[in-house]
Image: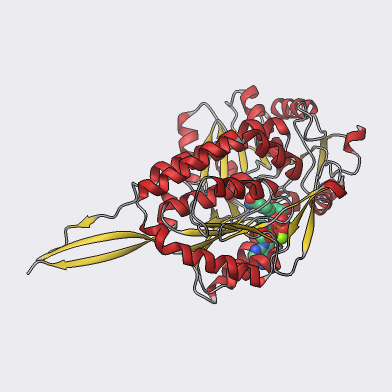
């Protein structure tokens, strides 16, 4: 397999090119460890070429009408739709996502985002302000220039589109640095960008490693802003590095989502939501519901059903349509998750532990069985740190005040869920949660139309909705003297 693996090219200034050094690095199928592609390892010079191409393309791109930019985004949406099967296959094969999920979620959400921002492109406008005196005061919303999008491996296609579509809709140009672990869908997307007729330089894709390719992009003085999704530790490094050139950054970072189940909650719904929150994408979600807070009166019943749901998960090769839990993205991630499971075993009680797959198709893959820990204390390592795997911590509480205090007792603040039929309890939780995204009686809902982002160590800035338009534009205030 490794000998037939395709060699991909970077996408710079509308051309598919090798890295200047000619260096490549392999990318794998995490389900069996086989090499499935080779990627150009872009260095500082490649990044410089991409940034300069993006800057050269900027004046003409921003000058186009919003409608004209929107039309090209719509064309890209159509091409993503026409190639959804291929994109889903690449996404699953490279990132380990179950193929059933890639087909249903990733491509569909990506198309939705492209269409939404295509429609937004001619609705970006300023305002007039009734200042006193003989003046008209108005604001202009202008693009920033070159935006760097640095993205993770858990939703490569979606993340690329969430960075590209609002930025170019607003008249910016972009350079995308996909994650080294999984980016084949993004490399394929670059071909569709070219096919859509989006002008050379407007979108560039430079694969490579974080500390080199990513850092070169953050340091580059011609990059106007960095939009990053990934770990909190890398977010801090990027914000620090960007300060040297005074670049604004948008950071969508890690999380430790609390799922709070009150005593009146419908048991089946609570268990379904809790299971979905931790098992989706093998728990490799920034919003993964990794802390399940159960009222002591419903603890046993909900836990029993969550375990039943865990037992129903089919851990296996991600291209098998029956698989619900695929491998995690890399041996490194598996090792990290295994470390947390060992730490949980030393501190808490194992309520359920799944089994590694024995199927021959899974040999050489990075499979992590489900673990459900009970009797977890919020101070334990497994309750404080982002695990990014199918590892659930179950905690109990006796009343509302305790539940909300525990839910908020976390460095993270990306998301929180409450499950109850009591409107007062629901709304008090909505108000109290220190989190950028709050779900009532569900988990994980996202839409291109709704702002998405974190509180506390989960980052700052917002993606999607009109909110992201404020992130990818700057406001100019203008005074007109009427005398
Ligand atoms: P990471 O945050 O280091 O990587 C994300 C992206 O940042 C990748 O494209 C990477 O190449 C780039 N990057 C890394 N260091 C950089 C630097 N110094 N300058 C510029 N770019 C840089 O995440 P990693 O190491 O892959 O995963 C480690 C942990 O991070 C996971 O176990 C998980 O807890 C968390 N994570 C959270 C994500 C989220 O969606 N919130 C996504 C991915 C990882
Ligand atoms: Mg890292």
Q: Is residue 163 above or below residue 447?
A: below
Horizontal and vertical percent for residue 61? 42, 58
Q: Is residue 287 left or right of residue 431?
A: right
Q: Is residue 392 above or below residue 243?
A: above
Q: Is residue 399 above or below residue 60?
A: above
The image quadrant where one finds the N terminus is top right
Q: Is residue 384 visible?
A: yes
Q: Is residue 238 left or right of residue 372?
A: left
- Residue furthest bottom as drawn: 244
Viewer-closest of 22 and 320:
22
Picture residue at 65% right of the left edge, 42% below the top: 288
Picture residue at 56% right of the left edge, 49% below the top: 194
Viewer-closest of 59 and 159:
59
The image quadrant where one finds the C terminus is bottom left
Horizontal and vertical percent for residue 399? 58, 37
Viewer-closest of 154 and 261:
154
Image-quadrant location for residue 475: bottom left
- Residue furthest left as drawn: 483
Horizontal and vertical percent for residue 354? 84, 34
Picture residue at 82% right of the left edge, 49% below the top: 334
Quadrant observed for ligand 2 in the rendered image: bottom right
Horizontal and vertical percent for residue 227? 54, 59
Image-quadrant location for residue 261: top right
Q: How is the image coloured?
A: secondary structure
Viewer-closest of 87 and 296:
87
Q: Is residue 474 above or below residue 391?
A: below
Picture residue at 50% right of the left edge, 37% below the top: 112
């Amino acid at each position: 397999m490794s000998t037939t693996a395709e060699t991909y090219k970077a996408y710079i200034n509308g051309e598919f090119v090798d890295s200047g050094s000619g260096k490549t690095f392999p990318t794998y199928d995490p389900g069996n460890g086989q090499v499935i592609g080779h990627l150009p390892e872009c260095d500082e010079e490649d990044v410089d070429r991409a940034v300069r191409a993006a800057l050269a393309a900027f004046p003409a791109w921003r000058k186009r009408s919003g409608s004209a930019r929107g039309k090209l985004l719509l064309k890209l949406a159509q091409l993503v739709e026409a190639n959804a099967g291929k994109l889903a296959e690449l996404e699953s094969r490279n990132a380990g996502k179950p193929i059933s999920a890639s087909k249903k979620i990733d491509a569909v959400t990506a198309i939705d985002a492209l269409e939404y921002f295509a429609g937004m492109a001619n609705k970006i406008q300023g305002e007039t302000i009734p200042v006193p005196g003989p003046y008209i005061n108005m604001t202009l919303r202008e693009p920033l220039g070159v935006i760097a999008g640095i993205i993770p491996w858990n939703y490569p296609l979606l993340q690329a589109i969430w960075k590209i579509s609002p930025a170019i809709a607003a008249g910016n140009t972009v350079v995308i640095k996909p994650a080294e672990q999984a980016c084949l869908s993004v490399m394929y997307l670059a071909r569709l960008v070219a096919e859509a007729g989006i002008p050379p330089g407007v979108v560039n894709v430079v694969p490579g490693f974080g500390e080199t390719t990513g850092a070169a992009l953050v340091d580059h003085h011609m990059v106007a802003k960095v939009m990053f999704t990934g770990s909190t530790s890398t977010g801090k490094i990027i914000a620090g590095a960007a300060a040297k050139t005074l670049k604004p950054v948008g950071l969508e970072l890690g999380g430790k989502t609390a799922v709070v189940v009150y005593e009146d909650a419908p048991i089946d719904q609570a268990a379904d939501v809790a299971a979905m929150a931790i098992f989706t994408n093998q728990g490799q979600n920034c919003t993964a519901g990794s802390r399940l807070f159960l009222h002591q009166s419903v603890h046993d019943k909900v836990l029993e059903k969550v375990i039943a749901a865990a037992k129903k998960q089919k851990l296996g090769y991600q291209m098998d349509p029956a698989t619900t839990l695929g491998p995690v993205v890399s041996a490194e991630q598996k090792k990290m998750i295994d470390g947390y499971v060992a730490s949980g075993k030393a501190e808490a009680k194992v309520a359920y532990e799944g089994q590694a797959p024995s199927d021959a198709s899974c040999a050489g893959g990075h499979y992590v069985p489900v673990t459900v820990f009970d009797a977890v204390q919020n101070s334990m390592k497994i309750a404080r740190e982002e695990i990014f795997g199918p590892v659930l911590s179950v905690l109990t509480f006796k009343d509302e005040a305790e539940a909300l205090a525990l839910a908020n007792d976390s460095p993270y603040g990306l998301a929180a869920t409450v499950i109850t039929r009591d409107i007062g309890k629901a709304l008090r939780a909505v108000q109290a949660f220190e989190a950028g995204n709050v779900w009532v009686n569900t988990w994980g809902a996202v839409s291109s139309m709704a702002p998405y982002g974190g509180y506390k160590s989960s980052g700052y800035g917002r993606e999607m909705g009109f909110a992201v338009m404020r992130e990818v534009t700057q406001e100019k205030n203008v005074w007109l003297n009427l005398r």
